Image: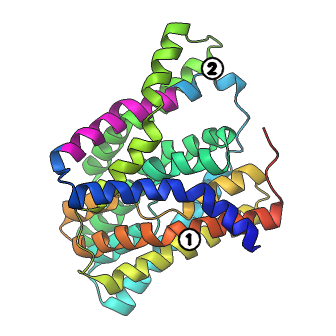
Amino acid sequence: MLILFLHQFELAAPLFLLVLLGYLLARFAGWGKQVSAGMNTFVFNLALPALLFRMMSDFSGLPPVDARLLLAFFGACLLTFLLGHFLAGRLFRLDPAGRAILGLAGVFSNNVLLGIPLARATLGATAIPSVALVLVFNALTLWTLLSVAIEWSRHGSLNWRGLRSTAAAVLRNPIVMAIVGGALFGLTGLHLPGLAQHTLAQLAEPAGPLALLVLGMGLAEYDVRSGWQQGLTICVLKLAVQPLCIWAIAWLIGLPNLETRVVVLLGSLPTGANVYLMARQYQRMEGTVAASLVLATLASAVSTPLFLVLLNHVYGPLPVR
């Protein structure tokens, strides 16, 4: 078991070291917010969309994905969110908006910046279609969950205009557009011309490393001293409760081996920076969420490889492809 852990840690460690490098560059080398913002724009609007469009454009040649993985992933998201919402009220006496933010921080994974590179490194390229399916629904589902929870607590009813705006914003997201557009192109049975293939490949090549650097640079902007108790609670929900809940549902519904590994891996990742944007939008729990982003990212360098070891122990190693 120790040897398996060290192997998985060795696979994941370079990725987390890139996150650390980004943090150090932002904190001590003068790579300020302008540099971070420019790199972030390139990664989200060009590099990662190029990577995902290129992979999904060969949709007909990709392995089939069991769509029940959505039930395992988002079913666990709902259960963990409700637990976080309950604990936020019982332990910390937070108001309804604060409870919703804490609950969401316990389920919203950093699936883009960390999930895509980590899945490719540890599970292989065959895992990307499963990751992509989760990504398409992730932001829309969890943003909607937060909006419903907060609007209901405030007004006792839903703000349908806000929900429509959320859905429209998600559909305009370059990551979602690349996945959907690539999949639709793949369904036509056509193949990208060689020039387009090579151009996309060049754009996609730095996507993984730059995404991790951007993540580290973003973490340098947060203060971990504020709300650390609630931040630790978020870490436990995010890094332990959610992946275990995902695994349990996947086992109950008989989800195949690869899909189970993908959704457990995604569930074991630290909280995504989008939750901080949500906290700022609703002016609740900003310090707590910032603390959880840093703490969970540090802890996941150990906890995520541990889950990969447990998956290998239960299901055996993935076949070499």
Between residues 318 and 267, which one lies in front from this camera angle? 318
Secondary structure of residue under mark 2? helix
Q: Is the residue marked by circle 2 packed among few (<14), some (14-19), or many (20+) residues within 10 Å? A: some
Helix, strand or loop for the magenta stretch, by majority: helix
Examine the rendering and report whether any part of residue 33 can be seen: yes
Q: Is the residue marked by circle 1 packed among few (<14), some (14-19), or many (20+) residues within 10 Å? A: some
Seen at 52% across and 66% down, the residue is 301
Residue 7 position by quadrant: bottom right
Q: What amino acid type is highlighted by mark number 2? A: Leu
Between residues 184 and 1, which one lies in front from this camera angle? 1
Seen at 68% across and 50% down, the residue is 68
The quadrant of the image that shows the N terminus is bottom right
Examine the rendering and report whether any part of residue 193 can be seen: no
Seen at 26% across and 81% down, the residue is 95
Q: What amino acid type is highlighted by mark number 1? A: Val
Compared to residue 55, the image places residue 255 above or below, namely below
Farthest front residue in view: 29
- The magenta stretch is 35-53
Between residues 37 and 287, which one lies in front from this camera angle? 37
Residue 31: percent from the left, percent from the top?
A: 20, 50
Residue 51: percent from the left, percent from the top?
A: 49, 31
Between residues 260 and 222, which one lies in front from this camera angle? 222
Magenta-span inclusion, residue 285: no
Q: Is residue 189 left or right of residue 316?
A: left
The colour style of the image is rainbow
Compared to residue 264, the image places residue 121 above or below, namely above
The quadrant of the image that shows the C terminus is top right
Label ID, residue 302: 1
Label 2, on which residue?
187
Decide which of tag 2 and tag 1 comes sooner along the chain. Answer: 2
Secondary structure of residue under mark 1? helix
Compared to residue 214, the image places residue 41 above or below, namely above
